Image (cartoon, helix red, strand yellow):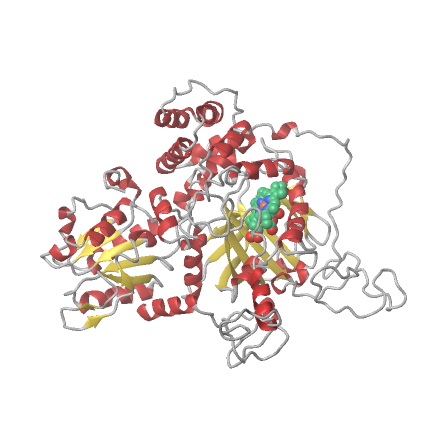
Amino acid sequence: MKNKTEKVKSQLAGSTAPDKKNTTAKTRDLESYKSDATGQPLRTNQGVKIADNKNSLRAGSRGPSLLEDFILREKITHFDHERIPERIVHARGVGAHGYFESYADHSSLTKAGFLGEKGKQTPVFVRFSTVQGPRGSADTVRDVRGFAIKFYTEEGNFDLVGNNIPVFFIQDAIKFPDFVHAVKPEPHNEIPTGASAHDTFWDFVSLQPESAHAVIWAMSDRAIPRSLRAMQGFGVHTFRLINAKGVAKFVKFIWTPKQGVLSLVWDEAQKIAGKDPDFHRRDLGESIELGNYPEWEFGVQIIDEQDEHSFDFDILDPTKIVPEELVPITPLGKLVLNRNPDNFFAETEQIAFCPGHIVPGLDFSNDPLLQGRLFSYTDTQLSRLGGPNFHEIPINKPVCPFHNNQRDALHRTTIHKGQAAYEPNSIDGGWPQETPPAAKDGGFESYYERIDAHKVRERSASFKDHFSQPRLFYKSLSATEQLHIAEAYSFELGKVKRQHIRERVVNEILSNIDLGLAGTVAQKLGIPAPKKPTIKVPEPSLKQSSALSQMKLTPQDLQGKKIAALVFDGLSAKAIRPLLDWAQQHSIALQLLGPTSAPVKTSEGKSLAVDGSIKGEPSILFDAAIVPDIPTDHTALLDNGQAVHFILETFKHLKPLALTGPGASLIKALHLEEDAGLLQAKDFSAVREQFERALLAHRVWEREKKAERIPA
Ligand code: HDE
């Protein structure tokens, strides 16, 4: 494992060789754009070899620089323009290549080719993001995560631009700029970075009750994911799938991770933001380098056209979920991420998603939020990527050929041959020509939907209920998850300066979701608890949806877990070897941490290299910890404040912790007690099974009360 870890670090520091295993059509396409400077002379952009890259041209060795120094001018000019505007939202992100594989021939559901054949693989690029913070902000802030996927299908690009929570904050695109202005750093001082705990956000959402559902999801553990690999993904809106006969079904898209849906605890998330702001991007990159390829199952909830109005919510309303109890998920395929980008800017930064990029066999619904999005994404690229030719940037190009009569504009790279840039024409043989709609390889055809309506600016009455689903969500969670929600609201509102905003959230929003929740938050803020809801919330047909609790969405195996083993001088190699074997067997990233980065001396007199120091790699970066072969006299360990802090913090953050060896009773000296995840034994094999169970459960939730007394 050590070699593996070293390999990871060195590979991530420098450039990575393309993964030979990933030979998708898109990877092959990107190959032709790659540039490798190995063995090459340094040249200007005009191809002139550079003799001296250290000194500019000047009049005498102490004289002024000369304007004619085209080498200096070119270098500085290019540098001056290296930056492009960051995304208005979702600026901080990380991406990876992979593939989508269809489980079967789903042509009865859709004529989309990428779902039309069992085992068919389609190249994809996925970009995960936070929403609020700028490009340089921390990964682990409380925020919704973007989950955007570009499928490079043989029939064109399909972008599924979703989030890790299933609902959105507003119902109509016209409110999006207001929402974003409210959540972004405040305009007078540009504070806070990467957080919603401030007055303008809570002012807006408390005046806009349609946000209540998305806000309670954002206050839940879903908004502080353990890793990007351990999040669900949702298309949010209702879409349509259409088969070759023109039969359409409404669908909701859902991604379920094989790694489980796992979250950090709040204290940990805040600390990681300081100690390793790149925590999520590092985790994704390292997992892929180690061959622990993250995987998601792609599923749809299918609703017949005639059932459009048979729910007590509107399926066009993006603030609503369709509970799985009402419409179960049908699995269609899987997504695997198996290759890191070669260049962050060229790929992750320049990728341009748009929900309007769809292929035959798919279509939109009339969700007013989705309709607005169809415009915004290509529009925003005009200023972000500098013109309308961003589809020619390698990461954005479809893998199928594309010809049309659009011409010119900034940064055009294609050299169009021919004289006739119009259609119809008789000069260039009439090419390129239209393809009529057809089952396979056909032209795109919109769903044959009849629209007969007045032009109005109004919301449908079926969009009016804003509270029954947040209530359903809250009631469906475990006591632990509910507690975290109360704490998140209390924390965030505690940062809100204006008392009337705090009161409005409690009295006009939380009271309508759950009086108990409103009461707890009110108490923590020192304001009177509301006695009753302010409105009559409709009783939904479904009282609980167990699918909403992430407690049940645990991982299938231990692959990709990150565990620290604290090692000290005098430990026996015999205690370490079985641990390394065990980690390798389960594809666990086990890191040996010593008092310093220097090797430790084993009791057999050998030197054991470590992966890092206890100080440099704090407990918050790991899923669990093991302290192997603790000697009966554990003074060396107790005298090391960093090591004691590491153990106590692992305990505080409810992580599995195994202390083994003759001095395992150290637990008492630290004033801790054994529990389902705090294990002590003579050797690791005695607690291995329990430790594995605790790892699969992710955290020892029943420890939470006890852990409160450990100083943060
Ligand atoms: Fe976005 N959104 N959005 N959004 N969104 C952008 O497009 C917008 C919405 C989402 O990794 C922008 O290229 C409007 C819902 C993701 O590159 C921008 C509305 C959902 C990403 C934009 C919404 C999303 C974006 C900024 C309301 C979940 C990152 C840069 C009508 C289903 C994609 C860009 C990436 C990015 C507009 C609402 C997800 C400004 C107008 C709902 C994952 O065009």
Above or below, 712 relative to 347? above
In the foreground, 426 or 334: 426
Quadrant in which the C terminus appears:
top left
Is residue 333 toward the left or the right of residue 559 in the image? right
Relative image position of residue 396 (x, y in whole percent): 63, 61
Is residue 656 toward the left or the right of residue 389 in the image? left
Quadrant in which the N terminus appears:
bottom left
In the foreground, 404 or 308: 404
Relative image position of residue 74 (x, y in whole percent): 60, 68
Image quadrant where residue 82 sits:
bottom right
The residue positioned farthest toward the left in the image shown:
633
The residue positioned farthest toward the top in the image shown:
531
Image quadrant where residue 30 sits:
bottom right
In the foreground, 328 or 656: 656
Query: Would residue 320 be visible to someone looking at this image?
Result: no
Residue at x 37%, y 37% (from the top left corner)? 484
Relative image position of residue 668 (x, y in whole percent): 14, 47
Relative image position of residue 657 (x, y in whole percent): 25, 52
In the foreground, 670 or 300: 670
Image quadrant where residue 83 sits:
bottom right
Residue at x 25%, y 52% (from the top left corner)? 646
- Report the number of discs: 0
Query: Would residue 657 be visible to someone looking at this image?
Result: yes
